[in-house]
């Protein structure tokens, strides 16, 4: 089983594949042809760079096609009063006496540096479908900790770009 993707994730990946096949592939092939026309290929840096860019594009296309082939499309709806995908959640960590804000996402959109929390992470799994005021225990392999759900913002959308990986 592969990635869990929402319908929007699938549409964005399909759009990227289409753009890479229709536009980027053509541009990179032209760059390879142009660089090849400059002569001796063994010392032609432009040619090697153009070939590398072309190969990276083809690799990305294959990767995205494989992601789609193995993906499970999931429903991103949730009850109005509980945490679901694409909701922004304020969580209080009593042990540290601090609050943090996260947007709950699928793994393909997660990025801890941008506050996007994977719904499959230990914290993400623990808080899904909980309500404001709930105290939730997050179980880790060697320990556990409690968090309190302070706020759920349902106005978030899943318009984030699919990250490059």
Image (spheres, helix red, strand yellow):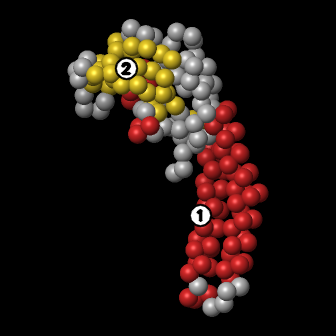
Secondary element under disc 2, as helix, strand or loop, is strand
* Residue drawn at the location 57% of the way across and 12% of the way down: 79
One can see residue 137 in this view: no
Q: Are marks 1 and 2 in contact (CB under 8 Å)?
A: no
* Residue drawn at the location 62% of the way across and 29% of the way down: 74
Residue 31: quadrant of the picture = bottom right
One can see residue 142 in this view: yes
Estimate how packed mark 2 is, as few (under 14), some (14 to 19) or many (20 or more) residues with alpha carbons within 10 Å. Answer: many
Does residue 12 sit above or below 155 in this rendering?
below
Is residue 45 left or right of 90 when viewed as pictured? right
Q: Which residue is mark 2?
A: 91
Which dot marks residue 56? 1
Does residue 119 sit above or below 58 in this rendering?
above
In the image, 12 versus 63, the foreground residue is 12
* Rendered location of residue 130, percent (x, y): 45, 14
* Rendered location of residue 64, percent (x, y): 63, 50
**Which label's residue is closer to the chain start, 1 or 2?**
1
Does residue 24 sit above or below 150 in this rendering?
below
* Rendered location of residue 45, percent (x, y): 56, 81
């Amino acid at each position: 089983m592969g990635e869990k993707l929402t319908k929007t994730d699938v549409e964005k990946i399909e759009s990227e594949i289409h753009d890479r096949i229709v536009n980027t592939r053509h541009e990179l092939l032209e760059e390879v042809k142009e660089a090849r026309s400059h002569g001796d290929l063994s010392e032609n840096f432009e040619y090697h760079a153009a070939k590398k860019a072309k190969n990276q594009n083809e690799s990305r296309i294959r990767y995205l096609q494989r992601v789609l082939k193995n993906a499970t499309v999931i429903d991103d709806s949730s009850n109005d009063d509980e945490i679901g995908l694409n909701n922004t959640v304020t969580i209080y960590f009593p042990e540290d006496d601090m609050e943090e804000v996260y947007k709950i996402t699928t793994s393909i959109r997660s990025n801890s540096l941008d506050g996007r929390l994977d719904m499959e992470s230990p914290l993400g799994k623990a808080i899904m479908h909980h309500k404001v005021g709930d105290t939730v225990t997050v179980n880790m392999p060697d320990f556990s900790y409690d968090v309190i759900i302070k706020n759920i913002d349902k106005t978030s959308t899943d318009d984030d770009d699919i990250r490059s990986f």
